[in-house]
Image: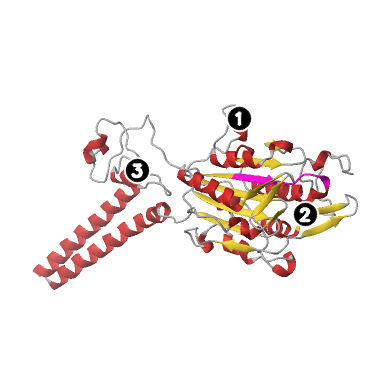
Amino acid sequence: MIVLSRLIFLVLVCVACLVKAQYEPVTDFFGRQGSSHTNNWAVLVCSSRYWFNYRHMANALGMYRTVKRLGIPDSNIILMLADDAACNPRNKFPGCVYSSSAKTLDLYGDNIEVDYRGYEVTVENFLRVLTGRVEPSVPRSKRLLTDDRSNIFIYMTGHGGNEFLKFQDSEEISAFDIADAVAQMWEKKRYNELFFMIDTCQANTMYSKFYSPNVLATGSSVIHENSYSHENDRDIGVAVIDSYTHYVLEYMEGINKTSQATMQDLFDTYDPDKINSHPGVRSDLFPRSLRHTLVTDFFGGVAQAEVLPSVYAAPFSNISGATAAEADPEVEGEGITELEAVGVLDSQPFIAALARAPESALGAPLARNTRTWATSGIVLLLVGWIASRK
């Protein structure tokens, strides 16, 4: 009997190991941790006009090129440019905007969509875009059509000071205005996570008033500190990019759509000696660790999908074989289950497919392996029983 008991224990251990090996990949796939967003948006604002602010336009266009390269489509980008330096009569290179004296990359080019230009770039329009309080006549291309699954990247550049940013030298937006707008966005379920970046003098004061959840913010300089330009171009006659934005874009050139670089990696590249100011980061409102938050969660197009039920599909069965209506009386009469895809893919349909073995292609391998181990176990039990009889 001792031999028989050991054989039974051995068979049970083998079957348990097999089941664990079969289900672990499924659990790992559906239980991945990370952002729960399903779409990305970007709002890029250059609030300065006039030729001598050429660099601010180059800042915004450089960020525009980066988010497009990483997968955010034009339909999900709101670009606001207060002036058109590309077509300025003083531009020695008409129709072009460069961010370096080498002029290796035209940031304007032929593939650019400006949503708000010139005198359309106002504090009112910016706040209306964020909060969704736009006139019915505003086209879809000028609306921020986000929801509670949207990760939003907001970039602003221009001239500013302690808790304010100038718009076209005629009006200002305060840190309180932006904080209240973000609060409205959260209440109206217009974002999942929001990343705010600003390049201006005393930039870090612009995110000091935020109080809404899931907000990560960074800026180019502390209070009472200026932000400086990076490079002058003698042909163009003005500075062509700001130092902080230049080094951010330089880092982003090494990022692709599948990159695993994190926001902490980006912030670790901040060097006050190179930037000539002291960039800051505010993460107390952000729930995730910066070391587990990918750069592409905000700068890139999302690569994950949300699984929705098909109106043509038959009801899924749970592990015991009961339909959704049997498992939950409240959904009785409905032809499908309601998949809960909040943040991660719902594993229930996949597990149900395994339970319907061997009819389903997913469940058939598990069923075959289970039968093999069961047969082996029966044989071992018979051998042990015969041995015990002798």
> What's the distance in space between the residues labelled 3 and 2, CA to CA?
51 Å
Mark 2 belongs to which amino acid?
Ile
**Which residue lies at the image location 56% right of the left edge and 27% below the top edge?**
136
| In-front residue for pair 338/132 | 132
User: Helix or strand or loop: what does disc 3 sit on?
Assistant: helix
* The quadrant where residue 327 appears: top left
The quadrant in which the C terminus is found is bottom left
Residue at the far bottom: name it: 2
Label 3 vs label 2, nearer the camera: 2
- Residue 70 in the image: x percent, y percent? 63, 48
Residue that numbered label 2 is attached to: 241
Position of the N terminus by quadrant: bottom left
Residue 345 covered by magenta stretch: no
Q: Amino acid at mark 3?
A: Pro
Local crowd size for mark 3, using a 10 Å CA cut-off: few (<14), some (14–19), many (≥20): some
Residue 108 picture quarter: top right
Q: Residue furthest left?
A: 389
Is the residue 42 above or below the residue 330 in the image?
below
Residue that numbered label 3 is attached to: 349
Label 2 CA crowd tier, 10 Å (few <14, some 14–19, many 20+): many
Of badges 1 and 2, the one in the foreground is 1
Which label's residue is closer to the chain start, 1 or 3?
1
